[in-house]
Amino acid sequence: MTTPRWDPAQYLRHAGHRARAFTDLLARLPAPPRDRPRIADLGCGPGNGTALLAERRPTARITGYDNSPEMLDRARTDHEGPTGGGGRLDFAHADVRTWTPGEPYDLIVSNATLQWVPGHADRFADWTAALTPGGALAFQVPDNLDAPLHVLLRDLAAAPRWRSRLAGVPRATDSVHGPGFYLDRLARLGCAADVWQTTYQHVLQGEDPVLDWVKGTGLRPVLTALADDPEACEAFVTAYRDLLRTAYPSTPYGTVLPFRRLFAVAVKPSP
């Protein structure tokens, strides 16, 4: 898979819809074990989700980590600084594939990031080991690789015209595991684990809104791979757009994008 180059402005075009899943995850978090908790947000992107977290935990010292300079610049500009409850919100460069906690954390959270991290479940042991007693590891990931927007993208990239340039570029079908896998992996680490799925029915507005949505996320590896050939990039996007128009037809009230997500909250036992 090609490492995508991110566009914060494009990602934030559907910020309201994207934030719903993180809001639902935050609602299931246990109370922090300390009055002034230490929190890490892995893959914080442009920081809008991290800011929601700071609203829920205003006394916390929160660091958002990301490996995209563009995302970090936007996050720092829009959100960095003290919080209303005496906490602090900062952002730092880190690669989730290798990030290891350097201090105890009361919460390690990740919002729509781990699907980009091959072998991410192998990192759970290090992360849960760094939790304070009663602390939590919590994440949500898109769980819809069987949805038309992904199937059509993979099929088009594998077509004769594109396979030499785009083979293996879209996100792989095994980049997210099933709920039972995550439950078993987290429970075997000694955590009390809660894993669930939700399918959102996003009603999107505007022209080709599903294409506009995926331009901020799943299409990024393809856009990155074809960035040096604007003509080819436009041809691919046009072909993909036409497929999406058929798969996600417009209605009088908008275009419906069903979107399934997987959630997990794992709490480390207290003494």
Image: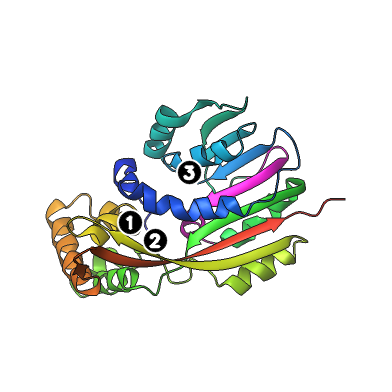
Q: Which of 209 and 85 is in front in this view?
A: 85
Type of residue at label 3?
Answer: Gly
Q: Quick one: SS at disc 1?
A: helix
Q: What stretch is highlighted in magenta?
A: 100-118
Q: Where in the figure is residue 229, as x and y percent of width and height?
A: 17, 52
Q: Which of marks 3 and 2 is in front?
A: 3
| Type of the residue with mark 2 | Met
In front of the other: 206 or 143 = 206
Label 3 SS: helix
Q: On the image, numbered disc 3 is attached to which residue?
A: 49
- Residue 56 as seen in the image, left or right of residue 162: right
**Which residue is found at the position 49% from the left and 28% from the top?**
80
Q: How crowded is mark 1: few (under 14 residues within 10 Å), some or many (20 or more)?
A: many
119 shown above or below 81? below
**Residue at image point 20% right, 55% down:** 206
Residue 220: which quarter of the image?
bottom left
For the point 43% across and 72% down, the residue is: 173
Q: Which quarter of the rendered picture does the N terminus lie within?
A: bottom left
Residue to which mark 1 is pinned: 221
Q: Is residue 110 magenta?
A: yes
* Residue that numbered label 2 is attached to: 1
C-alpha gap between disc 3 and disc 2:
25 Å
- Do tag 1 and tag 3 residues touch (Cβ < 8 Å)? no
**Secondary structure under badge 2?**
loop
Query: How far apart in space, not on screen, are marks 2 and 1 (Cα)?
Result: 7 Å
Q: Residues within 10 Å of mark 3 (few under 14, many from 20)?
A: many
